[in-house]
Image (spheres, rainbow, N blue to C red):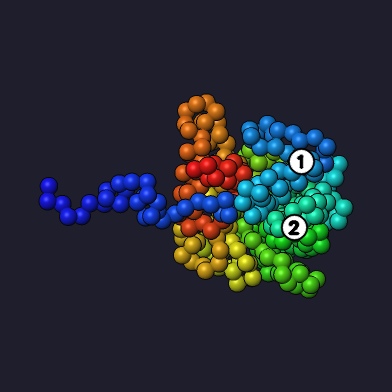
Amino acid sequence: MNLPIRPRRNRRTPAIRSLVRETVLTPADFILPLFLHEDEVDTPIASMPGVTRWSLAGLVKEAGEAHALGVPAVVLFPKIEDPLKTPDAAECSNDEGLVPRAIRALKAAHPTLCVITDVALDPYNSDGHDGLVRRDERGELQILNDETIGVLCEQALCHVRAGADIVSPSDMMDGRVGALRDALDAAGFDQVSILSYSAKYASAFYGPFRGALDSAPKEGDKKTYQMDPGNAREAVREILLDEAEGADMVMVKPAGPYLDIIAKVRESTTLPVAAYQVSGEYLMIESAAAAGWVDGKAIALESLTGIKRAGADMILTYYAKRAAEWLKDR
Ligand code: PBG
């Protein structure tokens, strides 16, 4: 054939392929979500095979190992004991609570590790919603926006007093980023960043996570605050609002089924974009791999590459530590 243009030339050898590769994963892309509890023992999480709910000591060890592999950051998710869950979620700003103690332990053991905390009320609130709840005259549950924001600010301040580097509001209340920025600045924490869960969808992919923390809503769903999976323009609207309110970084969540949103958001802002490969995405890969149906390592790395290629600068993933290991011996 007289064919002067042959794209296959750029794929001929591993060396040439590595020269022309557009997207390269590195451990520095990853944020490791870590579950913790008050217990002294590390417990495997039934709804998320391969993921552990850590004691404080286990948490410090696991974070240290991930950090040594090049993972720059962790984000903390506490399982709060039932008696401490109340309608006002007061435990979320207890300076002696589980999360602030964990932050102090992590920063003492690993000063260069970036510690991110989740700001939302669902682990603390007996209703299992991200905000405060009230029943209206018609008997329907309302998730209160403005009343919740003051509590979120107290929660964030508690985390940063303990040494958190970045606070990450995942609650989807309107106006919380601006309120958090004001509260942090007024308390002298102008160097603490806000990574906003800006475009967080009401997703069935969070199911295993809620099992891990026993944090599913007791009644109703999260559709009046988390976004409708059919909407893309609305994600841009949320991103631009959070940017205007002072977010330092924005997030799209989930990641894999929302690659178009990641790409759209990437084009709409100059802020760093994070994407969260959530528990259901992880579990689908893990269960297919456990059944012997797919090559789990290859599928996990390909999924993470797809998320980065779509436009994510950083990826929250339960694979962070394992993927860092895989990348090392690749
Ligand atoms: C709670 C929160 C959720 C996740 C992160 N923070 C669950 C939810 O919104 O119900 C989900 C993470 C995952 O599924 O891996 N604010």
Residue 112 versus residue 324 in the image, above or below: below
Residue at x 80% of width, y 42% of height: 57
Residue at x 86% of width, y 41% of height: 83
Relative image position of residue 174 (x, y in whole percent): 65, 63
In terms of image quadrants, where is residue 290? top right
Nearer the observer: mark 2 or 1; the answer is 2
User: Distance of mark 2 from mark 1, alpha carbons?
Assistant: 17 Å
Is residue 69 at all visible to an observer of this figure? Answer: yes
Residue at x 27% of width, y 48% of height: 8
Residue 247 versus residue 5 in the image, above or below: below
Whether the residues at callouts 2 and 1 have beta carbons within 8 Å, the answer is no
Relative image position of residue 47 (x, y in whole percent): 65, 33
Question: On the image, numbered disc 2 is attached to which residue?
Answer: 111
First-in-chain label (2 vs 1)? 1
Q: Which mark is residue 215?
A: none
Amino acid found under the numbered disc labelled 2: Pro
The answer to whether 229 appears left or right of 97 in the picture is left
In terms of image quadrants, where is residue 197? bottom right
Question: On the image, numbered disc 1 is attached to which residue?
Answer: 58
Q: Residues within 10 Å of mark 2 (few under 14, many from 20)?
A: few
In terms of image quadrants, where is residue 126? top right
275 and 64: which is toward the camera: 64
| CB at disc 2 and ligand 1 closer than 8 Å | no
The answer to whether 34 appears left or right of 265 in the picture is right
Is residue 34 at all visible to an observer of this figure? Answer: no
Give the SS element for disc 1.
Answer: helix
* Residue found at the far left of this picture: 2
41 and 70: which is toward the camera: 70
| CB at disc 1 and ligand 1 closer than 8 Å | no
